[in-house]
Image: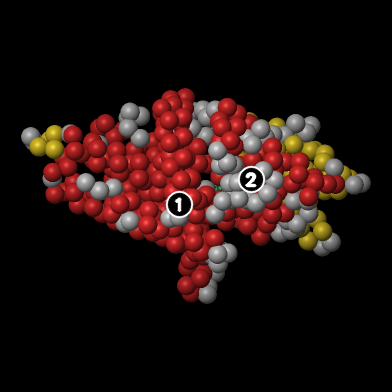
Amino acid sequence: MVTVDELFAIDSLLGDEERAIRDTVRAFANERLRPHVADWFEAGTFPARELAPELGKLGLLGMHLEGYGCAGTSATAYGLACLELEAVDSGVRSMVSVQGSLAMTAIHKYGSEEQKQHWLPEMAAGRAIGCFGLTEPDFGSNPGGMRTRARRDGDDWILDGAKMWITNGSVADVAIVWAQSREGERDVIRGFVVPTDTPGFSAREMKHKLSLRASITAELSLDGVRLPADAQLPQARGLAAPLGCLSEARFGIIFGALGAARDCLSAAIDYARTREVFDKPLAAYQLTQAKLADMALELGKGQLLAVHLGRMKDRHAISNEQISAGKLNSTREALEIARQCRTILGANGITLEYPVLRHANNLESVLTYEGTAEVHQLVLGEALTGSKAFR
Ligand code: FAD
């Protein structure tokens, strides 16, 4: 028997260091996270505080960033780490993505030297947790319409508004908050580094999710939050700034979602080999094998595309459209694989004893955040036709 990785000779595309990182993350994920993840999911909780220092020790927080205590690995190695974490649960990968690709990247790309020195080493070590507040109750796919405002009061900034669906929000020490600020005749989106103990800032955990239950999601309220002048990210101007961070997180999802798919497929193959129906193993039926073969093809092709895009990112030669193509393909196919695997497990597939429906439910969020599937179709549609169809 071969695995999908073997079938597509994925290892032959990776360097020694990349394989070593992947194996280390896989071992950590299987030993430290996998035994608990179904309980976290059922309880609707995630021990972010406890795990962050362990993830930091492994170099997984802000892993692909240079300096300030970050590991500075290749983008491909970061992707492989995302894949291994998401093979356990999309919630774990979400925590790491938001910390490294969103909150830390915002500071790394757009922050002042003081902001970088102050926050990045603490965040890389997992002693400080970050969140990224872009989405609002009325503005998700079109964040440019956001209502959160930043106004000057002397040298200070005052922030007012609300953010919704914010991963890590209620456990964060620092929030990157995006707000409209009046500059001359027009509004410009600016980013702010907000310590979460600032008066006027509050976060309320959102409960009753049916997806990404092993992940903390919160609403943020900003009620006259007074910040010093140097809380603004000096290099962040306009919507391109938060979108620049989202590209980083989307890149991680190209690999990550395939981890969830791999875990589902492996559970389905194990199950099909031992479950007997009509006096022989389910795996020995042609219909089952057709399903498994089709899923293996999509998973293998997805991984080849992910490594290809990883190599392009490592050469700084990747476009936003290419990242959209990868994010759309990986999330859509992973969700399809998770659902198909669920059919193979029959009724057992709906329980938490097996990972497949947990992954499928998680992937519904992964399909929606970091740009919905439809938004990425529109990005590709525009690239292919030259016509914008967003509005
Ligand atoms: P909407 O934008 O209202 O979209 C609804 C539907 O309309 C979708 O199907 C969409 O594709 C479709 N649609 C939108 N525009 C068009 C169009 N022009 N043409 C055709 N169809 C369109 N946000 C953060 O800022 N930080 C976070 O940490 C974060 N974490 C999240 C965690 C979870 C678990 C979830 C579920 C979301 C998170 N988000 C976060 C928010 C996420 O980014 C948004 O949910 C996403 O951008 C979609 O926005 P929306 O939910 O408002 O949907």
Place of residue 44 in the rendered image (x, y in percent of width and height, measured from the top left): 49, 28
Ranked by sequence position, the earlier of labels 1 and 2 is: 1
Separation of residues labelled 1 and 2 (CA atoms): 20 Å
Place of residue 128 in the rendered image (x, y in percent of width and height, measured from the top left): 67, 35
Q: Amino acid at mark 1?
A: Asp
> What residue occupies the far left of the structure in this picture?
279
Q: According to the image, label 2 marks what residue?
A: 70
Q: According to the image, label 1 marks what residue?
A: 16
Residue 302 visible, this angle: no
| SS at circle 1 | helix
Which residue sits at x=35%, y=41%? 263
Closer to us: 194 or 313? 313
Q: Amino acid at mark 2?
A: Cys
Which residue sits at x=70%, y=48%? 107
Q: Say whether mark 2 is within 8 Å of ligand 1.
A: no
Residue 127 visible, this angle: yes
Q: Is residue 158 above or below residue 37?
A: below
Which residue sits at x=63%, y=31%? 171
Disc 1 versus disc 2: nearer the observer: 1
Query: Coloured how?
Result: secondary structure
Residue 200 left/right relative to 313: right
| SS at circle 2 | loop
Closer to us: 306 or 214? 306
Q: Tell me the quarter of the image containing the C terminus.
A: bottom right
Residue 158 left/right relative to 242: right
> What residue occupies the far front of the structure in this picture?
16
> What residue occupies the far right of the structure in this picture?
154
Place of residue 193 in the rendered image (x, y in percent of width and height, measured from the top left): 74, 44
Which residue sits at x=44%, y=62%? 308
Place of residue 143 in the rendered image (x, y in percent of width and height, measured from the top left): 63, 53
| Neighbours of disc 2 within 10 Å: few (<14), some (14-19), many (20+) | many
Q: Is residue 343 above or below residue 74?
A: above
